[in-house]
Amino acid sequence: MKSARRITIGLALALLVTGCAGRDDVIVLDNRVYTLQRQIQQLKEETDGIKNQVAGRTAQLEKKIEASQQPLLEKQASSWNELEGLKGRLQGLQGRLDSLEFSQKRDTAPRAALETLSRELKDLQGRVQRLEQTAPPAPAAAQATKTEKPSEPAKESKETKEERAEEKGPEKAKPASPEEVFQQARSAGKKKNYEEAHKKYSEYLKQAPQGKHREEALFGLAESLGELKEQEEAILAYQKLIKSFPKSPYVPEALLRQASLFITLKDSGSAKLILEKLIKEYPKTDQAQTARKKMKAI
């Protein structure tokens, strides 16, 4: 303020010295400078007000998300514990069932085979008796040769093979590794299956919170939330990426998408601030060119 007045007075004095201006000119110049200063001050106040609004809105969104996620996380933890308990009970029951089925087959298979052999033995004895009654008497050596038959090796029954296979038990499926979960999330995103992508990216970040794909996973998570019309959560997810990886190549695109989401939410003030930041910090990027066009359209 003082420096502006000094400049005005200097100009007025110079004009007076040269004879080109009078007292009225000095007053007019002083009033114009004062008016410009008031306008600058008003612009600063409006800018500070917009910044405070953005900060307040962001804080409200963060609190809202935390408040909405806390019951969900607690419910998920409770459901997970309950599920693990049910899995344990199911495995125990399955083991008992397998044991009972094995015992039943082990007991019934020999019994059935014994009954079959008993019936065949009785049938053979009846046939031998009938042959002895109808055939002429034979020498003792020949008769002994006929009656004595070489024993055949016992064949392994089908039931025995099944019992051996059941004793080994079914192979349990291994849980997917973080790398596999990430690839599943990426594949779902490419196929525009954003619900599955959101689920898998969240699962990966939970399994590997400091994993090597965390940067891309955060971007994919935010992208899937935006496509699912969860604008506020998507804005916060992009902000988490920007804070965690400020030098990431994903940052310009994350800023541009944040601005677009604010425009969707009818918050043009916040959108302008983000677009200005994008243009200022990344002026040579394709995203900055798009941001300049959006600034004109707002």
Image (cartoon, helix red, strand yellow):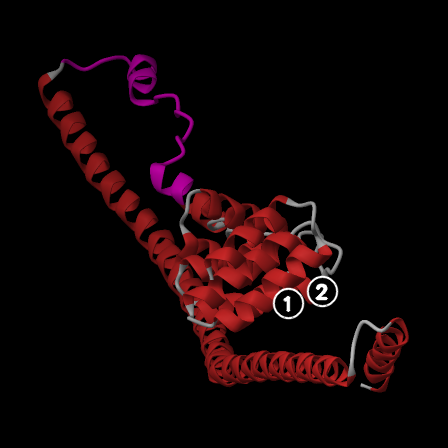
- Name the residue: 80% across, 85% down: 1
**Residue 125: x percent and y percent?**
19, 32
For residue 56, what is the image quadrant?
bottom right
Residue most extreme to the left? 134
Alpha carbon separation for disc pair 1 and 2: 6 Å
Q: Is residue 197 left or right of residue 278?
A: left
On residue 240, the disc is: 1
**Where is residue 266 shown, x and y percent of the image?**
42, 71
* For residue 50, side relative to residue 128 (left or right): right
Q: Position of residue 100 (x, y in %)?
A: 37, 62
Q: Residue 62 versus residue 170: which sits nearer the camera?
A: 62
User: Residue 7 appears at what percent x and percent y?
Assistant: 85, 77
* Front in this rendered view, residue 36 or 149: 36
Are there few (<14), some (14-19), or many (20+) residues within 10 Å of tag 2? few
Q: Residue under circle 2?
A: 244
Q: Nearer the viewer, residue 294 or 143?
A: 294
Q: Is residue 174 visible?
A: no
How packed is label 1: few (under 14 Cα within 10 Å), some, or many (20 or more)?
Answer: some
**Is 234 drawn above or below residue 61 in the view shown?**
above
Q: Residue 182 — which label?
A: none
Task: Identify residue type, mark 1.
Answer: Lys
Residue 118 visible (yes or no): yes
| Element at label 1 | helix
Residue 106 painted magenta: no
> Residue 138 lies in magenta, yes or no?
yes
Q: Residue at x 73, y 86 (%)?
A: 27
Q: Is residue 230 left or right of residue 128?
A: right
- Give yes or no for contact between labels 1 and 2 (Cβ–Cβ under 8 Å): yes
Query: Which stretch is magenta?
Result: 136-162
Q: Name the element at disc 2.
A: helix
Relative to 60, does residue 122 appear above or below in the rendering?
A: above
Q: Residue at x 36, y 36 (%)?
A: 157
